[in-house]
Image (cartoon, coloured by chain):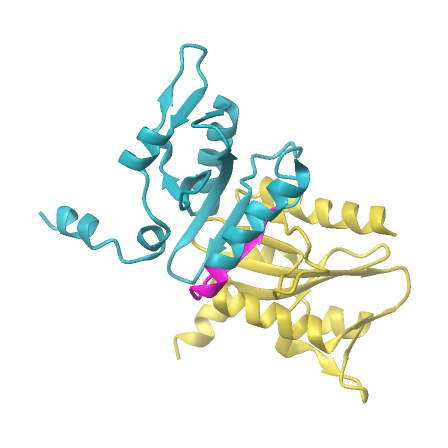
Chain colours: A cyan, B yellow
Amino acid sequence: MYRKGYCRELDLVNLFWDKGFAALRVAGSGSSSKPLPDIVAGNGKKYLAIEVKYTSKEVLYINFSKIEELIKFSKRFGAEAYIAVKFSHKDWLFLSPKDLKKTRSGNYRIDIDLAMLKGKLFEEIIGEEKQMKLIDDH
Amino acid sequence: MYRKGYCRELDLVNLFWDKGFAALRVAGSGSSSKPLPDIVAGNGKKYLAIEVKYTSKEVLYINFSKIEELIKFSKRFGAEAYIAVKFSHKDWLFLSPKDLKKTRSGNYRIDIDLAMLKGKLFEEIIGEEKQMKLIDDH
């Protein structure tokens, strides 16, 4: 399980390097007393903090506290916050914390439908996000 | 040795958190195929990439390749590059790669005198660096 998580994170880190970013896995992200994401990437213009989740099933659950930590870190560091989700045989999809739906227990649930509906592709989160800019210009 | 390095890095990471930055230790910084620093810190305005060195002696040696990696990472990520040096009973001092002196073998040597002469204090690397700005305004 540890090994698989490590490989998934490394896979994502390498995608960033291939596109001109510097990216890294954060040491102790699951155990530190500080709010830490799994991955941080930057290219001098754009900085991203990422929580990584993957599953062989069709739904993912994330603890409330993990998302709180991701938001806290991102605000302090000056980064956009994303949850990178990987379902079997699908590409990585990137959700913003505001896209998540709370369960009755106060945690978060992401199924494939939500990920496909709200998730951005890798190219979108590293790109110029032209659609966003058009909206902002109004 | 591993344990001590870990504590030194954590000590520095905590200093950043105390001053409003988010900071992290980089996983696999000594073993990755990618050029990775030991620590990355940011506060939305300032981003720093740091190689950490400490010794109980009066001189430190750093491999040429470690500094090359630090510079490469910093340029890509969009961060200021520093070598944080810690001698016994002294505060952390932060040197820029350009402050370093090469040895005959092509690596780098930092003694206490060089660190005291060229090194900046923690407050200076996170602060507004007013002196630098006055010089830049000419």
Say which quarter of the image contains residue A115: top left
Question: Image height check: is A60 above or below A7?
Answer: above
The magenta stretch spans which residues?
A16-26
Horizontal side, residue A20 vs residue B72: left or right: left
Question: Image height check: is A70 above or below A101?
Answer: below
At 52% across and 24% down in the image, what residue appears? Answer: A65
Horizontal side, residue B89 vs residue A122: left or right: right
| Foreground pick, B137 / A77 | A77
Which residue is most to the bottom? Answer: B104
At 36% across and 55% down in the image, what residue appears? Answer: A126
- Residue B34 position within the rendered picture, expressed as x and y whole percent measured from the top left: 61, 64
| Foreground pick, A58 / B132 | A58
Q: Would residue A17 be counted in the magenta stretch?
A: yes
- Residue B94 position within the rendered picture, expressed as x and y whole percent measured from the top left: 67, 63
Residue B106 in view: yes
Question: Image height check: is B79 above or below A137?
Answer: below
Q: Would residue A85 be counted in the magenta stretch?
A: no
Which residue is most to the left? Answer: A138
Horizontal side, residue A105 vs residue B66: left or right: left
- Residue B77 position within the rendered picture, expressed as x and y whole percent measured from the top left: 49, 62
